[in-house]
Image (cartoon, rainbow, N blue to C red):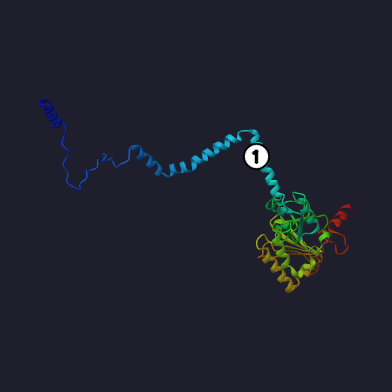
Amino acid sequence: MSGLKDFTRSFQAAVQPAPVRRAGARPAPVRAPRREPGPSRLAYRLNRLWLTPLYRRLLRVGLPAFLACLIGGLWLADDTRRANLTGAMTAMVDRIQSQDAFMVHSMEIEGASPAVEKGLRAMLPVTLPASSFDIDLPELRASVERLDAIEKMELRIKPGGVLSAVVTERKPAILWRHARGLDLLDAQGHRVASITSRDMRADLPMIAGEGAGDRAAEALALIDLAGPILPRLRGLERMGERRWDVVLDRGQRIMLPTDRPLAALQAVMAMDREDGLLGRDVVAVDMRDPSRPVLRMGLAAQNTLRRAAGLPELDAEGNLIDPETGAKGGEKTAAATRG
């Protein structure tokens, strides 16, 4: 019995008594240790990179594009695949361009002469009917406007597959005679065409001389100013590429200055209205110095003045004529030497 009592006391000493708690109370939960609220160093650096616009674009756009190009390049590296793809795209483009909605069946030209119309149809780069994609309208317009006879042209494709061309041709206003032949010029001096004879356009005024074509506008202004003497006008001649001579019938000339030729011609026309200057025996009216006009009289007028002054007359070559024998001064001297 003593042994059993000793065992009981030893067991009670080893076992801890249960904790005493108040009624209705619960034990406090066991909590895990708190983590540091700040991110790790690696997470911080990755977050900073993501906030950089360049890296964000690289990851969102650059990386997918690179992968797509890589896959496409690997697929196109095969010659057979590449040829099949090219053929399929070409066939698809041809099918689209050959649709009736894009076909041009005819060409309509307005405002062109028969010769110009024939040239325009010959300049069309394709044979109709053809696809509108095969006709480069700006290039065709530029090529046509380089022609001398055409000032401008409007091109457009009308509904129904009609290529419409509205042409504005240059109108010949003056005829230019130069060392290479005869050219028709418009009012701005642009070449229109060449002709072989003056009779082909006898209705147009004529200018002559090198450099005259570049001053066609000035020549037309002079011709308009010479209205009262237009029936006698034979043309204008460019002298030394510097000034104009107005050429009239009966061999008369009005020599205009380099500067302000219109004012000089206007002064000559005023003298003709007041005194009938150009109706007299005057060979030339020299206005090269507008402050000192000079008249060059004809042979009949010179002999009239010489007779009034008691001087011997002159022949057509400018030699003196003996009033008694009618012989020239040179012939009289030679006869005296032989005698």
Secondary structure at badge 1 equals: helix
Q: Nearer the viewer, residue 48 or 265?
A: 48
Q: Quadrant of residue 294?
A: bottom right
Q: Residue furthest front?
A: 1
Q: Examine the image and state in which quarter residue 81 appears.
A: top right
Residue drawn at x 68%, y 40% as measured from the top left: 87
Q: In this rendering, is residue 197 above or below 61? A: below
The residue at which mark 1 appears reads as 85
Rendering coords of residue 25 (x, y %): 20, 46
Q: What is the number of callouts on the image?
A: 1
List x then y, in percent, for residue 299. Answer: 81, 64
- State the residue in front, 176 or 306: 176
Determine the residue located farthest toward the bottom in the rendered image: 274
Write the residue at 49% across / 41% down: 62
Q: Residue at x 18, y 47 (%)?
A: 23
Image quarter of the N terminus: top left
The one of 182 and 63 positioned closer to us in this rendering: 63
**Where does the C terminus fall, quadrant-wise?**
bottom right
120 and 323: which is toward the camera: 120
Q: From this view, report whether residue 92 is shown above or below residue 1.
A: below
Does the image show residue 41?
A: yes
Q: Quadrant of residue 203?
A: bottom right
Apparent side of residue 85 relative to residue 9 in the rendered image (left or right): right
The residue located at (70%, 66%) in the rendering is 265
Amino acid bearing label 1: Leu
* Residue 298, image x, y percentages: 79, 64
Query: Vertically, is 128 above or below 35?
Result: below
Q: Residue furthest left?
A: 2
Observer able to see residue 294:
no
Q: Is residue 195 left or right of residue 244?
A: right
